[in-house]
Image (cartoon, rainbow, N blue to C red):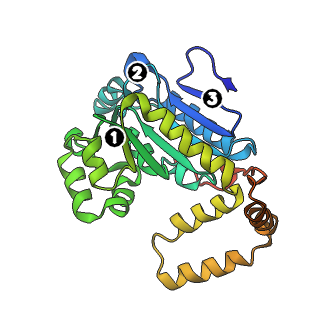
Amino acid sequence: MSANPGSDPVLWELDEHGVLTLSFSRPQRRNAWTRELEERYFGHLLTAAADPAVRVIVITGDPAGKAFCPGLDMDVLSRSARGQRPPESERLPHTLLTALPKPTIAAINGACAGLGLMQALCADVRLAASGARLTTAFARRGLPAEHGIAWILTRLIGLGPAADLLLSGRVFDAEEAHALGLVKQVVPHDQLMPTALEYARDLAANCSPGAMAQIKGQLYGGLDTGMEEGRREGVRLLRDERLADDFAEGTASYVDRRPPRFPGIGVDLAAKVKRDDP
């Protein structure tokens, strides 16, 4: 098990099961988003994608606090509103999680808004602590729905509910998020990380990393295609020899009634993702 020391805005902790926990850690600002946090977080994701030892990723807020990420730091937001914006450079897209070839779980431990909510929505599975409060917030700050959040929120919960949450920018709690289908499960705050880690470790132990990578490609690649295209893609992937060994191992482990021994995968995600223009 390893972890980053000190003042790092995003903590890295990899356990012996291959589950990586990334924790937003700016407790003095409730984990509010800054360019430094963004670059560190996305850098960790690129490293995780390339590391075969990382099988599943859990994203959460500083375990010492009760905030996930409440969006852009208000100091940065205020300066931007006055036209004092930092020089732009090429940036990785905020939808990077959807391109990551490994399953991601957002453990929403508290306040989750704006860019923080965007990261939670881009995770494959979301769990939330009871009483956690969420909001899109953009309309109440005089901003459009940034970074593709309108696209992904509509596909997660449907046009009507997405319109309500985006147009009103109202605060809603974890229980409503569960009713909308936005989160898989709501648990007491002290059970959030144990629940998320148990789920993640099951995936890490029993599911083929190669198969999960291909399934993620099917899920996100198929959002704007028809059923027939999705069917043909499934047939094509069945013929893909890259999973032949995993298929043999998955079948043998089931027949032998033993845990599977799937190899990890590493992908150069930076080479596959188009950066935003400055």
Q: Which residue bears the numbered disc 1?
A: 114
Residue at 37% in and 32% down:
72
Nearer-the-camera pick, 200 or 119: 200
Residue 36 x %, y %: 52, 28
Give the distance between the C-alpha atoms of the residues marked 2 and 1, in whole angstroms.
19 Å
Mark 3 surroundings: few (<14), some (14-19) or many (≥20) residues within 10 A: some
Numbered disc total = 3
Q: Is residue 117 visible?
A: yes
Compared with 74, 104 (above or below) is below
The disc at residue 13 is 3
The disc, 2 or 3, on the residue closer to the chain's N-terminal end is 3
The disc at residue 139 is none
Residue at 22% in and 63% down:
160
Q: Amino acid at mark 1?
A: Gly
Compared with 221, 213 (above or below) is above
Q: Quadrant of the N terminus?
A: top right
Q: Amino acid at mark 3?
A: Glu
Residue at 43% in and 47% down:
126
Marks 2 and 1 close (CB-CB < 8 Å): no
Marks 2 and 3 close (CB-CB < 8 Å): no
**Circle 2: element type:** loop
Give the distance between the C-alpha atoms of the residues marked 2 and 3, in whole angstroms.
17 Å
Q: Which residue bears the numbered disc 2?
A: 65
Mark 1 surroundings: few (<14), some (14-19) or many (≥20) residues within 10 A: many
Taking the image as shown, residue 274 lies to the left or right of residue 141, namely: right
